[in-house]
Amino acid sequence: MRMNGAQMLCQSLINEGVEVVFGYPGGAILPLYDVLPQYPQLRHILVRHEQGAAHAADGYARATGKAGVCFATSGPGACNLVTGIASAHLDSSPVIAITAQVARHFIGKDAFQEIDIIGITVPITKHNYQVSRVEDMAKVFKEAFHIATTGRPGPVLIDVPRDVFTDEAAFAYPARVNLAGYCPTVQGHPLQIKKAARLINEAKRPAIIAGRGVIISKAYQELKELAEKAQVPVVTTFLGISCFPESHVLSFGMLGVHGMAYANLAVDAADLIIAIGMRFDDRATAKVSGFAPHAQIIHIDIDPAEIGKNLKVSVPIVGDIKNVLQSLNKQIEGSGDRGQGSEDCQLPTGDCRLGWIRQIEEWRREHPSTVIRETEQLLPQYVIQKIHQVTAGRATIVTGVGQHQMWSAQHYCYDKPNSLISSGGLGTMGFELPAAVGAKVGLPDDCVWCVAGDGGFQMTVQELATIVQDDIAVKIAILNNGYLGMVRQWQEMFYGRRYVATPLSGPDFVKLAEAYGLPALRVRSKAEVIPAIQQAMDHPGPFLIDFVVEPEENVYPMVAPGAAITEMIESPVEKVEFGSKPRDISNL
Amino acid sequence: MATTKHTIVVLVEDRPGVLNRVVSLFRRRGFNIESLAVGHSETPGLSRMIIVVDGATTAVEQVRKQLDKLIEVVKVTDISEDNLVARELALIKVESGPSTRSEIMQITDIFRANILDVASDSIVIEVTGDDDKVGSLIELLRGFGIIELARTGRIAMTRGTIGPLLKQGISKQRKSNGQRVADSR
Ligand SMILES: Cc1ncc(C[n+]2csc(CCOP(=O)(O)OP(=O)(O)O)c2C)c(N)n1
Ligand SMILES: [Mg+2]
């Protein structure tokens, strides 16, 4: 069938199962927008800034596991995508970014709105393409989606010169790809898996560190089976949160720089680390040289380049997590019959691992890590705990970057798989609102809460208009501390309390929301918190709450830069009030 | 950390922008490329790059793995440890007048190098060899005054019939081509 390039592009998207595109038009991309009405299956959501389009596509991709798609015009439009593409790249998120380019005869002439977006995005994409002939369109799209969504996922950018949109040719969508240089390893090496199983069966103090790879591979069940069968405590990286139910008796929360003290202590004391779909990022390991000093390390990851990158490992296994764990679990010696559910997963007494798990549980009692002050002031952690309470843990939480991000990680109990969406690798402020838009569009039946900082929210606040225009029912909680809080905390702790450029004023967020056309509330006291959250939930559309919280609250525990994971600065709070992660340990 | 010289052979799809991706990766991971030679390989559509870098073995291993992730890279081999043959070509323009010409020609002879051009005040010499040989000739000629120097950088391959492709089990390009590279010994 003959089509022009723009039609081919749309048809390719449809062939790949794309239902929604986040985008922003402009001159060079006009021929594409012009044919969009011919494809009513493709819903286009107009964002208010291309960065928002990229973050929304990323949020969509993280929420659904499918590729998220964004459009931008040439030059400034393409450049505005960069932060969003980079965020997706560092967190292995399958975003397809489509940019228009000036017509072919203008390329290289510094034409109006010409930019070398291929050159710019080489280091921040898994791959990128410029479609130089309309005949290549279908093949490029087939390859791009394949590359973005398989192996270690990542963003792929496709740059289309304006005149390629209007050129015509016959269209046939290829059934398969043929890429000599791309063939991700799925199955783990059987000998390595055998070695790993032996180490696990013999370990006295094993610990699993699970990362986002588990979520990407949807290996929730397999991870749970491994942990339960082998009785191994599980800690997660920040991006690994929600890959394992946090109320599970074997869950010991997040490790790392703002991790739970007991998680860090467990990793430090372990004699075997089973690292699954994680990359020993410095936020997780703190000072890497002293990390897990007594442990042999099994590292399972689909990306061979991650193995041995930051840390020497004893047993590397390259493969898809789900696939590898299925093989591995068969070789794990179970410890008697045990129920599968989190409540009745009993650890039979007499097992050698029981003492180890008890030990970590004891560290949890000594260093509960999620305690907050007992006070009448409105603490940000309290807000997070109440969001968990009112949503019964069934929400998908999308955060910005900073203190509120860490409190969201620490004070909400993530039992639902893949229920935390956040920019971990790049740490992109302003991610929260557009990513929440994408998540909500991808999961229309889910309750999506955007937990925003007052700083980050102001970076992408214009997406409120998108939310209203397209009626995207996200619930927004701004933890308004009047500061670039995380930076202020560093200034307080390491720069003699000199608060340079961190006090931050903002607009009246309630009035602002109303100006954009969505209902909003301001909350200043503890008593108002639950009713406000309830009201937001009861309202069918988008809703914003401006929580005016204690301005100088700090995130604890914290590992200072350059310090080891065990050198935690813990909360000075003496009054202990258990956080939202109570635990019945009567079985232990 | 101790560094050693590594010869990395990268088989890539012959497309625009590939060189940029490869080079950009080296820069990004903090590697200084000592030399880089690119040309067609035995298979149409594939080019072979030979990159010499100085680095710690673990760091070079990381670069090798990162290179392997580039979609257009079909195969990467660090052949430094292998039994390899390596050659480099250099063109050297040396100052020479009537008083030095014969001495330069003698040196050229000893190195089995060729004289490509003789002018009244200079000679252009072509030398092929391993790094040591090319390096020593250049050192010897420095005394006469080198006007211009151009080196291709090292190209290399392993000895024997087990080339990088077959060794790693990725032999489809080789097979489809039906050609075998002659033993380079
Ligand atoms: C785009 C961007 N710029 C700067 C930073 C550095 N940074 C990290 S956290 C932070 C403060 C965030 O403030 P806010 O959004 O109010 O969140 P809070 O820490 O107060 O909860 C800053 C400036 C960043 N992560 N991203
Ligand atoms: Mg703030």
Image: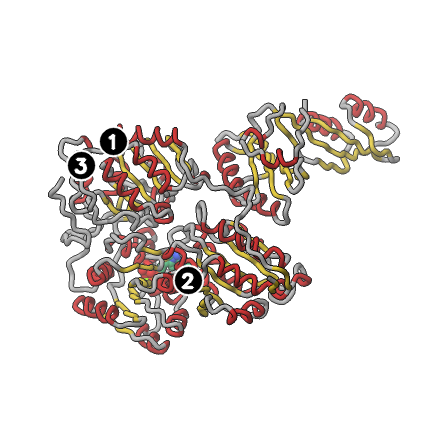
Residue at 43% in and 38% down: A309
Mark 3 chain: A
Frontmost of labels 1 and 2 is: 1
The answer to whether residue A219 is above or below residue A106 is above
Which residue is situated farthest in the left direction here?
A: A586
Residue type marked 1:
Glu
Residue A379 showing in the rendered view: no
Is B32 drawn above or below residue A191 in the view shown?
below
Report the side of B163 relative to A191 (left or right).
Answer: right
Query: In the rendered image, which residue does mark 1 sit on?
Result: A333
Same chain for the residues under marks 1 and 2 in the image:
yes
Above or below residue A102? Residue B80 is above
The residue closer to the viewer here, A315 or B96, is A315
Q: Which residue is mark 3?
A: A337
Give the amino acid at mark 3: Asp
Q: Which residue is mark 2?
A: A56
